[in-house]
Amino acid sequence: MDKRQFLVAGALGATLPLQAPASPSTARTGPGLLTVAGSISRSNRGPLNPALDQLMVKHGIKFDKAWEFDFAMLARLPAVTIQPTLEYDAKPHRLSGPLLSAVVGAAGVAAGASVMLALRALDGYTVAVSLADAQRYRMIVATKLDGVPMSIGGLGPVWAVYDADRLADFKDKPLKDRFALCPWGMYFIDVTTV
């Protein structure tokens, strides 16, 4: 027991050494919402389990290691708020969550890495975007819509999205064409080196 633990333990009247909590960046305490696999250098879960990872199996996903996020892990990353006009009701909405680049960075993908990100939604919809474009578009992994956590059955629980109203590549397109690179209900990211 180091001096700090001894002093805290003594002040609390404890007789046993204090244990350091598991690292908050790796310890998943809630349901897994988003899995990142492929060309990553960190992992907090083992290979795909063919018996228990049924949706991934149905979507043909394979991996030997992955980084799995729960809501709290995503919430610990710095959040960004955007306010795009959504194609579903033609109204602006506040979306907040960490940058997509920060999410894959937590899995060990370097900021300047030459990689493609295959973003897969619960319904199987998959889009590929380069990390460079994800950074240029300031794509976020939205966890909240108008201040409320998103649900399965709506646009959540996480949505890879950008502020299309403010991006030259998208702002002049018809509203229905602005979000083709933005899978809602995203649950898996496959990182591949190019």
Image: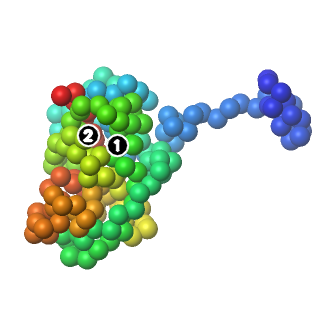
Q: Nearer the viewer, residue 107 or 46?
A: 107
- Mark 1 → mark 2, Cα distance in angstroms: 7 Å
Percent position of residue 63, x then y: 27, 26
The numbered disc on residue 131 is 2
Percent position of residue 150, x then y: 36, 61
> Residue at coordinates 21% horizontally, 36% vertically from top-left?
116
15 on left or right of 119: right
Counting every numbered tag in the picture gives 2
Q: Residues within 10 Å of mark 1 (few under 14, many from 20)?
A: many
Q: Which residue is mark 1?
A: 101
95 on left or right of 2: left
Q: Residues within 10 Å of mark 2 (few under 14, many from 20)?
A: many
* Three-letter amino acid code at the position of disc 1: Ser
Callout 1 touching callout 2 (CB < 8 Å): yes
101 on left or right of 24: left
Q: Quadrant of the C terminus?
A: top left
